[in-house]
Image: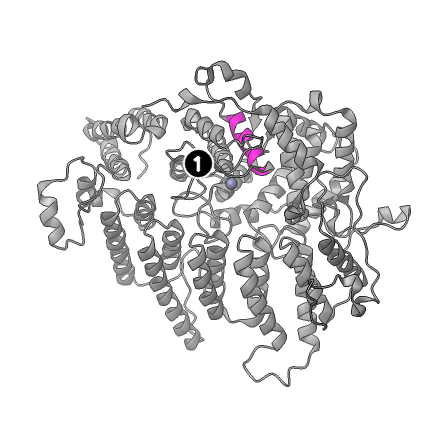
Amino acid sequence: MPLPDPDGVPLFAERPEWADVLPLEQYEDVNPIAPIFYTEEYKAATNYFRAIVKAGEKSPRVMELTESVIRQNPAHYSAWQYRYETLTFLLASTTSDSTPKGALPPLLAAELTLMDELAVQFLKTYQVWHHRRLLVSLTKQPSRELALIKRSLEVDSKNYHTWSYRQWLLSSFYGADENGREQDDDDEGETIEAREVWEAELDFVDTMLAQDVRNNSAWHHRFFVVFHSGGTEHEAEKERIFKRELVYAKQSISLAPSNPSAWNYLRGILTHTRTPFATLETFVKPYTVAQKSAGDAEKRDIVDLDNPPPSAEAELPCVQALEFLADIFETQGASEPGKENTEKAVELWKSLANQYDTIRKKYWEYRIREAHHGKEPRT
Amino acid sequence: MSDPSSQLSPLLRAGHVAHCRRCLNGLPASQTDVDASRLALSFYCIGSLDLLGVLEEQVSVKDRKSWAQWLWEQHARGKYGSGFRPSPFMTAKHLSESQKELEYTDYDTPHIIMTYTALISLAILRDDFSRLDREGLLQFISACQREDGSFSTVPGSNESDLRTLYCAFAISSMLNDWSGVDVPRALAFVATCRTYEGGYGQSPFCEAQGGTTYIAIASLQLAPATGAESETLTPLERQATIRWLLDNQDKSGGFSGRTGKDADACYCFWCGAALKILGAGHLVNSAALAMFLSRCQFKYGGIAKSPGENPDPYHTYLSLAALSMYPPEASATGTYSASWNFAPLDPLLNAKEETALWIRQHIPAARI
Ligand SMILES: [Zn+2]
């Protein structure tokens, strides 16, 4: 391949190795909607791409051509599709004698290296991630991918594509389903590896949340790791995990009380394990009053894992705590003849509607109406 | 409570019309990546003009005809059935007239999201759909459905998530024919995308997100009754979803797409429309919503994802669609009330009610 000249890579039309291809220009109606004023480079590359596709050519130079199209338009899904098909064709037709056992064929290794670069450059393009999924299905090396994602999350810690890809990797290669992972007794080695991966994953989430306790993507990932994948059928083990998560959520709330992600996680683990919200009444109450109680300062000195108090800087009352306590009262009130607790819930909702969460005034007033009409409680 | 709408400025309708017309006329090279979804961009532009109520008076019959003609040029038939392609980006200039009728290849197939947006765009242009290949369309949807119940963007691709499932459902509903879809399998897939927060992620195990939650809720509502358990939400699930959606409206008045993220104009539609479908639209703070969207307006036209950002047709259309569902009260808009006036929107198909009615009357196969 000639070295690029100082003015950049020559157009495909000017390159002798493409002289055998008749470029196919794009069809366009006389009155197109939203025509794009393409650059000459893009026009040239896609003209050759259309020709190559029409001819069905799958050769090494197609890799170069599709890379050029993709760099100029990462959303060009046909270029991605054709690139992948060309890659698999070339992999199947090259003899792998020279490749050391266990190592990836050079072509595939080169593709991964290129994708590492493009994943960062085109972080928000669907196609980049779909292509990776196809590649890792070929390499069967998910651990390399987990390391890459870690780096890419350092750039953008809430990127949806990146997290989705991680969840897909873990569920596809280390087993995950709605009810938790199934143990595969036939392959002890794989089971041990999977267990180690899931344990490392929990450490990874810890690190992410330590950096930003408000990162909801990390909280979501935690729920996924703990409840959809770390499979166990033992009741005692389930109970231990639930207790651990409960302590984790409460500790996080105590450090940063007005964090909806932590409260949603708390609600999530309670609902998932069918634990009544009322079991947390003692924990929640200090977060629902404007004044910190005199005992809180002392309580902070002794470690109370079950009921960690709000931090000294916390802004109280906390909206999510008021909502949580109202949910507890609503449930209790529903089964009382005198509905005393319903009225306590109503008082909390009123304070949310009129003072602490006025943007949702209509919602809190709706909760009041619903409770008075004796609709089903929600917890 | 301070009244956030007290400073509501006028909606810059003429500017938004101009923004959309500019994009319809052409896009700079920096937007080359729109090539693979140009029909969607066309829909956001034409749809905005429809919501703003200016199509008939400000766009000539000739222009509307040529737009419809361009949309039909993206319609293609082939071995997976019929549908619409995003643009001619893979179509070579034909060397003779006879080549015009050639079938698509494996690299130039219709795209399910583009097909949905094309049908709505054509309905906005009041096309009579006499050219629609209904049987082919059903075959195409069916070719996109995968083993797990989800749908791929194009037949055979591994790119699939909840967005494509919604498109398959919306097209089936438009055709009033569900024979192209395995509904129970599709609904089972929707159910696996639900998360502990009460929203839905774009694929199983993914974080709850406003856009995909709309997609899931609208799909459940569009689905024909099959008696399947996954077809309806339990009362508790419904409450949890309403709670999560409403929680996404933050102090700015706008909605965020995920817990703890900043508000973004498009989620005013996605979350707002999901709430409307769930029968909880009256719980949205529409005054604050209008205030947020008024601040997302770009002074030379168009609406951006958040104040101070650059506008685009996607956020312009979805903001106008959100306002069509949640117009601010006349008392809040004062002398500018006319600028905030919209015709009602069908949140299920995401089109003006009048346009949705046209769809219902013209897309289903004629009954004999
Ligand atoms: Zn947006």
From the viewer's side, name the closer residue of B281 and B265: B265
Q: Which residue is mark 1?
A: B255
From the viewer's side, name the closer residue of A239 and A69: A69
Q: Is residue A160 left or right of residue B186?
A: left
Q: Position of residue B242 (x, y in %)?
A: 41, 35
- Residue B318: in magenta span: yes
Q: Position of residue A347 (x, y in %)?
A: 22, 27
Look at the image and tell me whether residue B177 can be seen: no
- Residue A195: in magenta span: no
Q: Secondary structure under badge 1?
A: loop
- Mark 1 CB lies closer than 8 A to ligand 1: no
As drawn, which residue projects farthest toward the front? Answer: A6
Q: Residue at left 64%, top 24%?
A: B354
Q: Position of residue A302 (x, y in %)?
A: 11, 54
Q: Is residue B27 left or right of residue B344?
A: right
Q: Picture quarter containing residue A12?
A: bottom right
The tally of labels here is: 1
Residue A263 against residue B239 in the figure, above or below: below
Main SS of the magenta segment?
Answer: helix
The disc labelled 1 sits on which kind of residue? Phe
Q: Picture quarter containing residue A285?
A: top left
Q: Residue at left 52%, top 49%?
A: B189
Quadrant (top left, top right, bottom left, bottom right) of the C terminus of chain A: top left
Magenta residues span: B314-325
Q: Chain of mark 1?
A: B
Q: Is residue A356 left or right of residue A228?
A: left
Q: Picture quarter containing residue A176?
A: bottom left
Look at the image and tell me whether residue A96 can be seen: yes
Q: Position of residue A350 (x, y in %)?
A: 26, 26
Answer few, some or many: residues within 10 Å of disc 1's Cα (few below 14, many 20 plus, some between 14 and 19).
Answer: many
From the viewer's side, name the closer residue of B21 and A180: B21
Quadrant (top left, top right, bottom left, bottom right) of the N terminus of chain A: bottom right
